[in-house]
Amino acid sequence: MAEERITQVDSPSGTTHTTVVSDGSRGGGATWLILVLLVLLAGVAIWFFSGMNNSEVAKDNAVAEAASDVGNAANQVGDAAQKAADNVGNR
């Protein structure tokens, strides 16, 4: 809160001179500007980190899909080996 000091001087001729001195600044405009900038910065940070989280999920899904494909290929190789063994045994 700003502090005000009022000085009143009476001259011998009867005139009165009043001086008001205010210590501190109101700074309302600058405070609001800083507050708005902080809110915008928080929004950008949330957007950025949520995007990073989405890329992690996409990476995890890609790895899981690749593992599934490898498993399917292994099953096919196993089936082919079984058929080859069956053909050798039938001759």
Image (cartoon, rainbow, N blue to C red):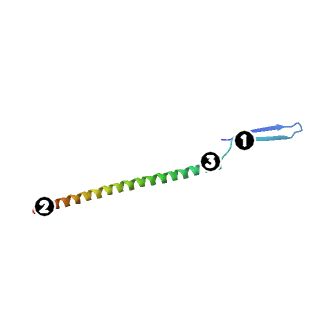
Q: Residue at x 29, y 58 (%)?
A: 69
Q: Which residue is mark 3?
A: 31
Q: Position of residue 24 (x, y in %)?
A: 69, 41
Mark-to-mark CA distance, 2 and 1: 104 Å
Label 1: how many Cα within 10 Å (few below 14, some 14–19, many 20+) = few
Secondary element type, mark 2: helix
- How far is mark 3 from mark 2, CA to CA? 86 Å
* Dot 2 and dot 1 residues touching (CB under 8 Å): no
Q: Gap between marks 1 and 3, in whole Å? A: 19 Å
Provide the secondary structure element on which disc 3 rests.
Answer: helix
Left or right of 43 on screen, residue 91? left
Residue occupied by mark 1: 22
- The quarter of the image holding the C terminus is bottom left
Q: Which residue in the protein does label 2 denote? A: 88
At 65% from the left edge and 48% from the top edge, which residue is drawn?
28
Q: Amino acid at mark 1?
A: Ser
